[in-house]
Amino acid sequence: MPSCDHDTCKSCAKTGCAQHGQMAGESAEQYEGRLRLAERMSHVRHKVLVLSGKGGVGKSTVAANLAVFLALQGRRVGLLDVDVHGPSIPTLLGLESYSAYVQDGCIVPAEAAANLHVMSVGFLLKDRDTAVIWRGPMKIGVIQQFLRDTEWGDLDFLVVDCPPGTGDEPLSVAQSLGDADGAVVVTTPQHVAVNDVRKSIMFCRKVNLPVLGVIENMSGFVCPHCGETSDIFTRGGGEAMCTELAVPFLGRIPIDPGIVTAGDRGEPFAYLKSKTPAGLAMTAAFGPILALADQDPALA
Ligand code: ADP
């Protein structure tokens, strides 16, 4: 490993620092970028990635509601949407009219609440029907820039809504946030989706990213009239897989048409406060993530 020259490492004062020293083959620009990322992330106490093996399982819904839940608990939260293919966070949080801009060399995130700031690839698109047709290296470049240059200030939690799958894009996020607390993996109960999430767990293991737990979304339907749960798809596939792979199971979130309405209207705060069975299930599933901050000193 290359060693860090104490005199030139601007990020830490450790001699022999392999993390911050300029590495063989690394350009001065890449080195500067890595230092900026390290500096930015030094203001973030907990980094949580939200992953899924495939699209459409509710990953962004979980990421948005997790960020809102943490903010409702009084934490300072950043929500970063780097799902370059389908950035739905602006819609889910009612921030579609926001356009990102740069101030003093940093990207200014949108304010969803005093303690919840949001940055999304969607804020760069001229209109929401624009398709992202960037090639791989460009997508990775945008992801890196968002991680490095978004001005969050001090955060208790940074929640990152990652692109689905186990390709270069989630890999780039995981590698850039080298010391993240871990990943929340979202799946649906069907066999095919559960197999996809198995790949996500293997992915986490390969990149040394702890799995904070799996959420089985769209698991059963609670009848709004009688309150009885019907299992529309099979049930329990996510939990069985967790037992098999020895990762925590965070819980099931039932299908609730109210989630779609709240998402389309950009009103997750109201939804989470409404104490529906799905809202309560989310709150319970997010408890262990909030608990990551249990040992933190009190807010400044
Ligand atoms: P992904 O990020 O995995 O592509 P989204 O979070 O965008 O998925 O969700 C896809 C659609 O499913 C959205 O319309 C969302 O409102 C809906 N949805 C997500 N979770 C639920 C749920 N538990 N009940 C009902 N609809 C849901």
Image: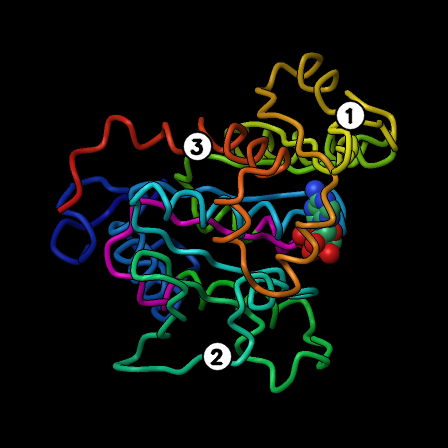
Nearer to us in this view, 201 or 28? 201
Q: Is residue 106 left or right of residue 101?
A: left
Most distant residue in the front direction: 225
Disc 3 under 8 Å from ligand 1? The reply is no
Q: Is residue 282 left or right of residue 1?
A: right
Compute the Cα span from label 3 to label 2: 28 Å
Q: Residue at the spot x=39%, y=70% of the render?
A: 109
Query: Which residue corresponds to mark 3?
Result: 289
Asked which quadrant contains residue 121, the reply is: bottom right
**Contact check, label 1 and label 2, Cβ < 8 Å:** no
Query: For the residue labelled by badge 3, is the local secondary structure a helix, a strand or a loop?
Result: helix
Q: Is residue 236 left or right of residue 274?
A: right
Of badges 1 and 2, the one in the foreground is 1
Nearer to us in this view, 169 or 186? 186
Q: Is residue 165 visible?
A: no
Asked which quadrant contains residue 156, the reply is: top left
Residue 205 x/y as whole percent = 59, 29
Q: For the N terminus, give its image quadrant.
A: top left
Q: Amino acid at mark 2?
A: Tyr
The numbered mark, 1 or 3, whose residue comes first in the sequence reads: 1
Q: Is residue 83 above or below residue 216?
A: below
Residue 217 included in the magenta stretch of the image:
no
In the image, which residues are magenta?
148-171
The numbered mark, 3 or 2, whose residue comes first in the sequence reads: 2
Q: Amino acid at mark 1?
A: Glu
Q: Is residue 101 above or below residue 294?
A: below
Query: Which residue corresponds to mark 1?
Result: 228
**Contact check, label 3 and label 2, Cβ < 8 Å:** no
Q: Which mark is residue 98?
A: 2
Q: Amino acid at mark 3?
A: Ile
Compute the Cα span from label 1 to label 3: 29 Å
